[in-house]
Image: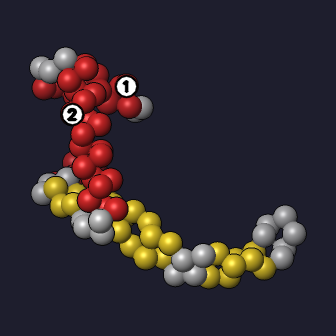
Amino acid sequence: MNKSELVSAIASASGLSKVDSEKALNATTDAIKNALAKGESIQLIGFGTFSISERAARTGRNPQTGKEIQIAAKKVAKFKPGKALDESIN
């Protein structure tokens, strides 16, 4: 499912127009991005938790040359599904 299909699904389920549904989706994703950028986690009961995790620096290997390279440390976004989401999938 891509973004336009998701907007259509939100519009049909909520009774909102597609324009309003896209605004709501954009506002939601922006709020999640802003909270994660601040280092906060977002917990949606029944759906899941978005959080930030620190990935340590490490030594990797270039698959073309076999030469060792340093991979810098960075923050990565994580999502842990909630119990209700997990049960609905399985």
Query: What residue sits 31% from the left and 61% below the top?
Result: 36
Q: Given the current orientation, which residue lies at the most extreme right position?
A: 65
Horizontally, residue 88 falls left or right of residue 39, namely left
42 or 2, which is in the foreground? Answer: 42
Query: Image quadrant for the N terminus?
Result: top left
Residue 17 relative to residue 77: left or right: left
Distance of label 2 from label 1 (alpha carbons): 13 Å
Q: In this view, does 28 lie to the left or right of 53?
A: left
Q: Which residue position is annotated with label 1?
A: 4
Q: Which residue lies furthest to the top in this view?
A: 17
- Name which of mark 2 and mark 1 comes first in the sequence: 1
Residue 21 position in % (x across, y down): 22, 26
Relative image position of residue 25 (x, y in whole percent): 26, 36
- Quadrant in the picture for residue 77: bottom left
State the colouring used for the structure image.
secondary structure
Q: Residue 64: which quarter of the image?
A: bottom right
Query: Dot 1: within a 10 Å radius of its alpha carbon, few (fewer than 14), some, or many (20 or more) residues?
Result: few
Vertical arrangement, residue 60 with respect to residue 31, above or below: below
Secondary element at tag 1: helix
- Name the residue: 37% across, 25% down: 4
- Visible residue check, residue 49: no
The reply to whether residue 15 is in sight is yes
SS class of the residue under badge 2? helix
Compared with 3, 83 (above or below) is: below
Label number found at residue 24: 2
Residue 46, quarter of the rendered image: bottom left
Q: How crowded is mark 2: few (under 14 residues within 10 Å), some or many (20 or more)?
A: some
User: Residue at the spot x=52%, y=81% of the render?
Assistant: 56
- Residue 52 position within the rendered picture, expressed as x and y whole percent measured from the top left: 35, 68
Q: In the image shown, does 9 or 19 lie closer to the viewer?
A: 19
| Image location (x, y in percent) of residue 55 | 48, 76
Amino acid type indicated by mark 2: Ala
